[in-house]
Image: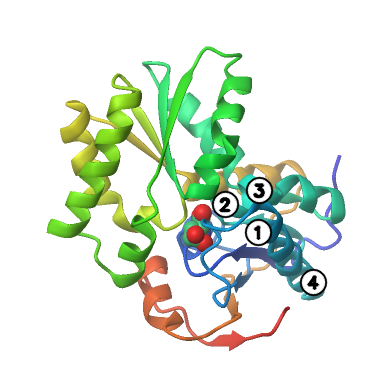
């Protein structure tokens, strides 16, 4: 059985920018006693349009920084980094690591009745085919998938354009493409940490385009639950009696407080800029 060096150390979390705050929000809900050290690589965001090699190089640097801060486990709160870099991180670092793909894929399999799952995410995540592969292998080929890259959702979420005419139009275009590929799906994975911010719009348009209620899977929530299950299984839940805090590091601090607060749903507090290149 894996044992953690010190159960009261924080959990390290990284993302390409602020999207990972949707995962932190879920961690705070399901693991309220845990302290979190968050690194947003905001100087190099977006990862979703970059190559596997580049994203992996950045992910290794992010992990090295978080490990230098003393953490008990690492959560890769970025779908693109999880899709491209998880095996490299697992090989290189001697710390329990959870990405967002596996928990999201498992939650989708538990939710689908039709045996048909759609995946929306960045160009990198959808192009990698990792969600589709994972679902195929977990379901032994019984569940079909289709993916649609939705790159415009990221700037819309960053700008706070989360409802109204423009995001509805964009969602309608992307989800109609998905509908053309897999018309009878009943579950869609929000395979990008930005998308939960657009959840209401995506839900509305998905129900309209597919003509029935569609279950959306927030891979951030699924990941927080997987982290809780893991920590419980290794008796690694913090024994601290006080509520955990969140320390935020970024590689560029411009606009972080405003956008981060929208993703976290509460003020993110003090932000420290670091140079990790
Ligand atoms: N955090 C990224 C993800 O979940 C989205 C933003 C980006 O492209 O870096 O895939």
- Mark 2 and mark 4: Cα distance apart in space: 25 Å
Q: Earlier in the sequence, mark 2 or mark 4?
A: 4
- For disc 4, the marked residue is 70
CA gap between label 3 and label 2 equals: 6 Å
For the image, the number of numbered tags is 4
- Depth check: 46 or 187 in front? 46
Q: Nearer the viewer, residue 96 or 186?
A: 186
- Answer with mark 1 or mark 2, whichever residue precedes in sequence: 1
User: Can you say which quadrant of the picture contains the C terminus?
Assistant: bottom right
Label 2 vs label 4, nearer the camera: 2
Among numbered discs 3 and 4, the one appearing first in the sequence: 4
Q: Considering only vertical position in the picture, is 246 above or below 202?
A: below
Q: Secondary structure at mark 2?
A: helix
Using a 10 Å C-alpha cutoff, classify the residue at mark 3 as few (fewer than 14 neighbours), some (14 to 19) or many (20 or more): many
Label 4 Cα neighbours within 10 Å, binned few <14 / some 14-19 / many ≥20: some
**Residue behind label 4 places its C-beta within 8 angstroms of ligand 1:** no
Q: Nearer the viewer, mark 3 or mark 4?
A: 3
Instruction: Give me the C-alpha separation between circle 1 and circle 2.
Output: 8 Å
Q: Is mark 2 within 8 Å of ligand 1?
A: yes
Mark earlier in primary sequence (1, 4) = 1
Q: Are marks 3 and 2 in contact (CB under 8 Å)?
A: yes
Which residue has dot 1 on it? 55
Q: Is residue 146 visible?
A: yes
- Marks 3 and 1, how far apart in space? 7 Å
Label of residue 84 in the image: 3
Residue at image mark 2: 80
Badge 2, how many Cα within 10 Å: few under 14, some, many 20+? many
Name the spot of residue 104 as percent of width and height, x first. Answer: 52, 39
**Rendered view: 78 above or below 120:** below
Answer with left or right where residue 240 lies relative to residue 158: right
């Amino acid at each position: 059985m894996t044992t953690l060096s010190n159960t009261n150390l924080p959990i390290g979390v990284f993302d390409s920018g602020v999207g990972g705050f949707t995962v932190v929000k879920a961690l705070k809900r399901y693991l309220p006693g845990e302290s979190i050290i968050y690194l947003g690589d905001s100087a190099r965001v977006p990862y979703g349009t970059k190559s596997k090699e580049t994203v992996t190089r950045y992910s290794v640097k992010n992990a090295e920084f978080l490990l230098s801060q003393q953490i008990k486990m690492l959560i890769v709160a970025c779908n693109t980094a999880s899709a491209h870099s998880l095996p490299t991180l697992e090989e290189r670092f001697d710390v329990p690591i959870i990405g967002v793909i596996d928990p999201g894929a498992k939650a989708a399999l538990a939710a689908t009745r039709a045996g048909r799952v759609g995946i929306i995410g960045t160009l990198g995540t959808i192009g990698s085919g990792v969600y589709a592969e994972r679902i195929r292998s977990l379901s032994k080929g019984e569940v079909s998938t289709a993916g649609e890259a939705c790159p415009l959702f990221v700037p819309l979420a960053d700008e706070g354009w989360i409802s109204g005419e423009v995001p509805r139009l964009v969602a309608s275009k992307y989800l109609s493409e998905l509908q053309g590929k897999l018309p009878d799906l009943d579950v869609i994975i929000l395979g990008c940490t930005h998308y939960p911010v657009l959840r209401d719009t995506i839900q509305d348009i998905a129900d309209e385009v597919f003509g029935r209620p569609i279950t959306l899977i927030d891979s951030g929530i699924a990941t927080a639950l997987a982290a809780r299950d893991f920590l419980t299984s290794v008796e690694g839940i913090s024994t601290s009696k006080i509520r955990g805090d969140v320390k935020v590091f970024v590689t560029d601090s411009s606009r972080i407080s405003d956008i981060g607060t929208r993703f976290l749903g509460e003020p993110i507090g003090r932000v420290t800029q670091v140079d990790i290149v």
